[in-house]
Amino acid sequence: VNIAPPDTLGCNNPTVTLDGSASEPEDEIDFTWTNLAVDTLGMDSTLTVDVPGIYILTVSQTVADFTCATRDTVEVFSS
């Protein structure tokens, strides 16, 4: 899992995009963005957020009926 460092939320930047698209191989994996409450927030490689906090990206791949998953977290700050 590879999440690019996000910008900081602020008056001039009311939303930031979390980007996990560098995770490999993008065309063969599934993306799930959640928060700490495990609410699903998105199913794409990127997620636009407007609230500071910790976000979790889980990347999974199914091969021959076996699913492997890994995850990483990123924290969004506000100024």
Image: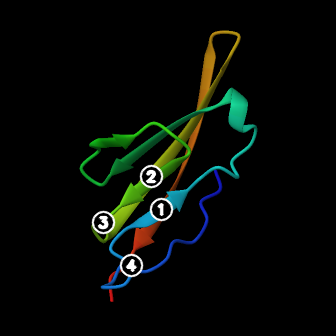
The front one of 54 and 49 is 49
**Which amino acid does the dot numbered 2 rest on?**
Leu
- Vertical placement of 76 versus 25: above or below? below
In the rendered image, the residue lying farthest to the front is 12
Which residue is at a point 27% across and 43% down the rendered structure image?
39
Percent of width and height locating residue 53: 31, 68
Residue bearing mark 1: 17
Q: CA distance from mark 3 to mark 1?
A: 9 Å
**Which amino acid does the dot numbered 3 rest on?**
Asp
At mark 1, the secondary structure is strand
Residue bearing mark 4: 13
In the rendered image, the residue lying farthest to the bottom is 79
- Vertical placement of 13 versus 26: above or below? below
Q: CA distance from mark 3 to mark 2?
A: 10 Å
Residue bearing mark 3: 50
Q: In the rendered structure, which disc, 2 or 1, sits on the residue that comes first in sequence?
A: 1
Which residue is at a point 51% across and 43% down the rendered structure image?
58
Q: CA distance from mark 1 to mark 4?
A: 10 Å
Q: Nearer the viewer, mark 1 or mark 4?
A: 4
At mark 2, the secondary structure is strand
On the rendered image, what quadrant is the C terminus found in? bottom left
The crowding category of the residue bearing disc 2, from other C-alpha atoms within 10 Å (few below 14, some 14 to 19, many at least 20), is some
